[in-house]
Amino acid sequence: MAFLSYLISGLGLGSVYAIIALGYSMVYGIAKMLNFAHGDIIMAGAYAAFFAMTAAGMPLLAAALISMVICTLLGVTIERLAYKPLRQASSLSVLITAIGVSYFLQNASQLMFGSDTKIFPSVLSGSFSLFNGRLSVSYLSVLTIVICVVIMSVLTLFINKTKTGKAMRACSEDKGAAVLMGINVDAIISITFAIGSGLAAIAAILLCATYPSVYPTLGSMPGIRAFTAAVFGGIGSIPGAFLGGLMLGIIETLAKAYISTQLSDAIVFAVLIIVLLIRPTGLLGKKVSVKV
Amino acid sequence: MNYRNLLKTGLAAVMAVSLAACGSSGNGGSDSGSSDGAGSTAALKLGASGPITGNAAVYGLAVQHAAEIAIEEVNAMGGTQLEFNFQDDQADTEKAVAAYNALMDWGMQISLATVTSGSGQAVAPNYAQDNIFGITPSGSSTAVIYRDTVNNTDPYGVLFQMCFTDPNQGTASADYLNTHKELGSKIGIIYRSDDNYSTGIYQTFKAEADKLGLNIVDTETFVDSDTDYSVQVKKIADAGADIVFLPIYYQPASQILVEAEKQGFKPNFFGCDGMDGILTLENFDTSLAEGLYMLTPFSADAEDEKTVNFVKKYTEKYGEVPNQFAADAYDCVYAIKQAIDHAGITADMSTDDITAAMVKEFTSMTFDGITGTSMTWSESGEVSKAPKAVVIENGVYVGVE
Amino acid sequence: MNVIKNLFSPKKRSRTISLLIVIIAYAILQIMSSTHNISRLLMSLLVPVCAYITAAIGLNLNVGFSGELNLGQAGFMSIGAFTSVIIAGIFNANGIEGIPVLIVCIICGSIMAALIGWLISVPVLKLQGDYLAIVTLAFGQIIMSLINNLYVGLDANGLHFAFVTNNMTLAEGGRMLISGPMGATGVRTVSTLTAGAVLVIIALLIAYNLIDSKSGRAITAARDNRIAAESIGISISKTKTLAFVVSASLGGAAGALYALNYSSFVAAKFDFNSSILLLVYVVLGGLGNMSGTIISTALLVVLPEMLRFLQSYRMLIYAIVLIAIMLISNNETLKTKAEQFRNKLGASKRKGAE
């Protein structure tokens, strides 16, 4: 029973990682850049929702909407100002710029909101029990998992069934050819950033609902974890990011429960390395063969 | 091939920066300082370093703000004048050494040393070498004042602490739980394993608890990068702990309290001075902290005149209630002032003389501040003040025996 | 004359220039410090700058020449640093101090890092692109996590090791060299600017010798076109392993220099962010460009210290400067302008020669 209970909290943690990883993976797939500032957009989303709920007294859904709008605007603005001028530059230059943006957002929010932790309002409490009360599952974990599955399904449908989705796939495949086909690559990349950042807002709310502290460097660790999750599942793959996130959450929780809390970090990364050795492009990643 | 121009400009830039650095040495100081006019004496240069950017900024800012308030008050009294320079060290050993050197370039004569222990142990040998007196508000590790950290001997001699040392808190906590068995006899512990402060307290607590024969049923750890505490809380709960010792700072502690509430786990919780601040976390449901015991030297609710004045000023100026970091820093400045006044230290004395006089004063004087009364210091720099045990009742600290 | 011409021949030019930069900078700084014309702050930054330059040169071999994104270089610095703390501790206990300790530590630190780098390279180099990057990141995190739980003590009976919980009791006069999250304490500092400059020069020589060697050409060939390189019989894994191991050993040497410059430091210092910072130095200096790496490292380490007067705004400004540099250096219009300017300059020079 203890095992099941750990498994469920692992799933809860994993689905938060998964949502962040979805945003990461999408941006990577289309723009081919590691957006290290993604975690900090989550932080911005968390602050936006926090102030909407506490200072403005808004209900959760309105706060979520505000947070999504702010994150989307922020994401698109960053893309315009910092990443767009680097379309032709090497991917490493973009990576460094993303790190600069990440530092900027962290320091700006520290100056604006102070560095002390703020406690996120309780969103959904309570739990139900199974097996005659021997196992209790919180509504929040269930909600997180459900939202995660919904988002993944919608994203997959969007990418596979809509015209914009098709254009996105085309950009991801070959930008040059996409331009020749009359696709506005810049617009598609902006849309990708908008969606990725919007997702970040949802991730922020779920993250803070589960672990209710809001502080300027809130996003950096989940950001790295989500990056790991995205690679774990096969970067660029939407179901892969989902699976990678869940697996990472479960491994982390079980490692803490049964092996060592001190070494859980080392264990998670060791498992990642082993998985990549067996499947060099992640769990669901495509093997790219190069034609000569 | 075409790098040459770039190189030349680059090289020139390096040189320019270095030259600028030499030029600027000596006037890189910050705000808050000598209002000349009051008193005929020149201001003594008081330096400090701590994190004001990055993860640990909250502690550095608390110290900086409180010290600035205290210095303003001291300068307004006339007599001894202090000029303050606070440098950012990002709670990083490398940056701490840089910050120390920036302060020395400025001409630091007396120091509040560093805010964090890690930085403190990194610059301690520099203080000893340059023979500069320092009293740290909150660097509580023994490595800040002792060279030999195995036996806690061979003190640097010029560094003093306003806060309790970590081992001190560990043993005091174990002793308290030993004499207050009614709080619980099955002890669970959650501490942060990649943190100096937390492991320092944990290790001495464990040693003392073993000596006293206390029953520790489970010990769990977490690291800085953890966001999820559900496993630790569940394991402690499953082990049947009825008192949980949390030698950690208030931010993770608040998360652990939330998690325990979620899991319906309701033991007594017991913390150390790092727990102070939990009631002032923005939007924290203080009912979760109800019944939380802690050993802390400072309570923002205290009703003595000094504390009320300090808390009022701090809250007005910075919009938040000061925590123990701030309180310790405030006390540091006043303790320094007391020593300066008594020894008749002036700004034109050499640092060797100032340091000798300060050390002599600190090892002989008694100081009453807002984090304790009748404080004295040993020659090794450890403070002796009574730890106060408090329990949170109806959202405020209540002193307990 | 011919010697000089040879030194500035197209093949050797970048090597000579980068060495000259180090030597000239060293000479100027030495003069400044001997005439006390240098602030203590800047003086204290010089050794870490040398350490970071050495590590960045190593990383540049990896990222610039080999074309592998490495996000774990700080891990190798960490290995070198903590290895040298143990070795220096043993030496000091036996009454040996000073520069010989530093030399032995740097050698041992780099060997240890190279050894572990070699072990790691086996799984790492089986992967490509971002998968490779994440595995180096993972190893960096694992190294940090392990050292964070490592306790090493030294007494009359020799070295004592403990892991996760410190349960050792040391004999009289024993001391802790590494104590878990508290890190290394009581290190006797011996690193000097001269030692740092020498290390940077050695690192440059190693790097350029590797680049100009047969293996170096194989590495570049493998980077530019893996399949073509393989088809002419270049063993990709062998060349990449070589670059990776040399890079790791330079990281280790840098760590040793760094370690013996500070009396105390913690394992968490060498985290993901430090690896990223090293990467920033390399990218900003230009991939494969050693002189660029040296200059950008020196500037970026010194910059936040020079921004101290901004108080709590300094890291914000630092971030803005970083973004601005990336945008400006990649700006197409500016690039074309610079190109035109250079062409003009080249033309007038040629004219002058005639």
Image (cartoon, coloured by chain):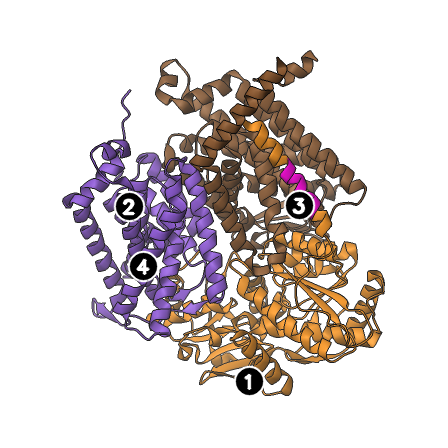
In the image, which lettered chain appears brown? C
Subunit ID for the residue under disc 1: B
Residue with the most extreme left position: A161
In the image, which lettered chain appears purple? A
Subunit ID for the residue under disc 2: A
Distance, label 3 to label 2, CA atoms, is: 41 Å
In the image, which lettered chain appears orange? B
Q: In which quarter of the image is residue B57?
A: bottom right
- Secondary structure of the residue carrying tag 2 is helix
- The kind of residue on which mark 3 rests is Leu
* Region in magenta: B12-20
> Which mark is drawn over residue C161?
none
- The kind of residue on which mark 2 rests is Met
Residue C335 point in image, percent of width and height: 47, 33
Is disc 1 in contact with disc 4, using a CB cutoff of under 8 Å? no
> Which mark is drawn over residue A201?
4
* Near-viewer residue (B197 or C49): C49
- The kind of residue on which mark 4 rests is Ala
What residue sits right under mark 3 in the picture?
Answer: C45
- Residue sitting at x 71%, y 52%: B24
Distance, label 1 to label 3, CA atoms, is: 48 Å
- Residue sitting at x 65%, y 79%: B372
Q: Point out the frontmost of discs 2 and 1.
A: 2
Subunit ID for the residue under disc 3: C
Asked whether the residues under marks 1 and 3 belong to the same chain, the reply is: no
